[in-house]
Image (cartoon, rainbow, N blue to C red):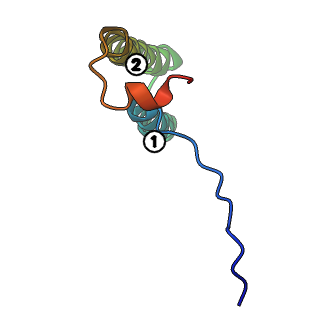
Amino acid sequence: MSDKKTKNFSVPASPFNGIKLDIGIFACIGIILLIVLESTAVSPLTELLWLAGFGLFVLGWVYVRARRVYARLQAGRYRNARQAEPD
């Protein structure tokens, strides 16, 4: 076989990966909520209020999580902060 070194493309872990996962989970929950609301006999106003309330909840959740991660990065308390900084 060959003794060539294989070059792997790798990127250091982002401190915001947890938030990205949350957004993906909330998107799936939002789609399920939309399907449930469409299949039940609710008025369009009720459907709009449910979806708007869910959207505002997700917005607040992501905002708070992002602020906490950013604050930890600024304070230098994030464990991968040194890896994420350029040399």
Disc 1 target residue: 32
Q: Quadrant of the C terminus?
A: top right
- Viewer-closest of 41 and 9: 9
- The residue that appears at 37% across and 32% down in the rendered structure is 80
Q: Nearer the viewer, mark 1 or mark 2?
A: 2
Q: Position of residue 35 (x, y in %)?
A: 50, 41
Q: Position of residue 19 (x, y in %)?
A: 41, 29
Look at label 2 and name its amino acid.
Val
User: In the rendered image, is residue 15 in sight?
Assistant: no
Rounded to the nearest whole Å, what is the CA distance between mark 1 and mark 2? 19 Å
Where disc 1 sits, the SS reads helix
Mark on residue 75? none
Q: Quadrant of the N terminus?
A: bottom right
- The residue that appears at 37% across and 15% down in the rendered structure is 73
Q: Is residue 73 left or right of residue 8?
A: left
Where disc 2 sits, the SS reads helix
- Badge 2, how many Cα within 10 Å: few under 14, some, many 20+? some
Residues under numbered marks 1 and 2 in contact, where contact means CB atoms less than 8 Å apart = no
Look at label 1 and name its amino acid.
Ile
Disc 2 target residue: 62
